[in-house]
Amino acid sequence: MCIRDRHKEAGVPWLLVGAPEADTRQPGVHKGGAVYKCSASRPGDCSLIPFDTKGPTMAPTGQQYDSKSGQWLGSTIDSSGEDGTILACAPRYIYYMFMNRRDPVGVCHIARRNSRTRQYTFKKFRPCVESGKWGYHRQGNCQAGLGASVAHNGEQLFIGAVGSWYWQGQVFSFNFRRPSKQSLTQEGSPKDDDSYLGYSTTTGEFNGDGDRLDVAVGMPRGANLTGKVVLYNANLTNLNNVTGDQIGAYFGYSLASCDVNGDGLDDLAIGSPMWTDYSIEDRFETGRVYVVYQDKQNRFRTIDTLTGETHKARFGISVASLG
């Protein structure tokens, strides 16, 4: 289950709850997942957000084009805030490519509510299908949406695709109102294979230009397995990097941005759930959260840490901002 609590409609707060194995009785779909909008004040008052009510996509010839069963819709959700855009992803969505390939390319959906009609309009994004670069060595296994975020303006989307380029990972940036304003990261060198760029994402202001359209992206197997968080602007120009300090700790597994110290600058909370203090016997994977502060020169150098205390607690597997 995934929960986001900053969404509001007409001033009314709602909890957005993802249920990745829910069965909503879509025809021909088994446990495709769902997203619910639940009242913050009335327990049990929940309604389904109908991102997708159709069964598998079929050609006129009867050929099936995709599979939504077990796609994990709702495993990633986000909201741009009051009267904003709701984002929900299904990273295990499968598309049937030519030559009978079945590629787990992932899909993300957005919903926006019309304040007058109170109805939602929907749009879907399948960046690894539209690219046409099929196959496990390219974008066929990209699993888009394992990490994804929507910026505060409700128009800029960032979608992580951890399986692209031999699992180097990839990031897509979309402005859904301006289709020409799309960007994507390119394939790196073979040493970046299995780095998982795009595993987690969070938006904020990280370069001082005031647009709040920047993104931090987790790469938990990057930097020689110590993990890395890569900061980009909206067109995916690299702004900065923050690197972990322990091999295999999965630094960047989870991310959140907020102004922790009240200086008006967005800081980062970075989960590292496999972190271990090897000086303590028989206590592994206690986990750690790094709070990395942004300074006035938009650098990220000062760090506080919060460390788990229980064997295999994996503290930091999820982090969030409370506002």
Image: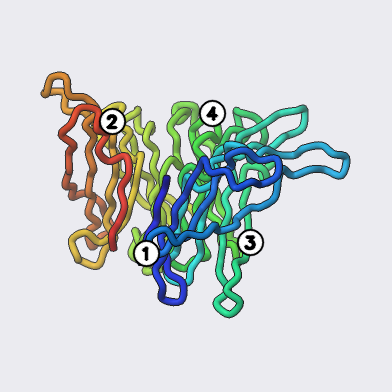
**Mark 2 or mark 4, which has the lower sequence index?**
4
Front residue (pair 192, 58) = 58
User: For the residues marked 1 and 3, what is the alpha-carbon distance in whole angstroms?
Assistant: 35 Å
Circle 3: residue type = Pro
User: How much space separates mark 1 and mark 2, taking CA atoms?
Assistant: 33 Å
Q: Nearer the viewer, mark 2 or mark 4?
A: 2
Q: Which residue is rendered at x = 44% and y = 62% of the image?
A: 45
Which secondary structure, mark 2? loop
Q: Nearer the viewer, residue 159 or 21?
A: 21
Q: Quadrant of the C terminus?
A: bottom left
Whichever of callouts 3 and 4 sits on the residue coming sooner in the sequence is: 4
The residue where tag 1 is placed is 40
Circles 3 and 2, Cβ within 8 Å, touching? The answer is no
Q: Secondary structure at mark 1?
A: loop
Q: Residue furthest bottom?
A: 116
Left or right of 293 in this view: 45 = right
Q: Amino acid at mark 2?
A: Met
Asked which quadrant contains residue 48, the reply is bottom right
Look at the image and tell me in which quarter the N terminus lies: top left
Determine which residue is flagged by label 3.
Answer: 179
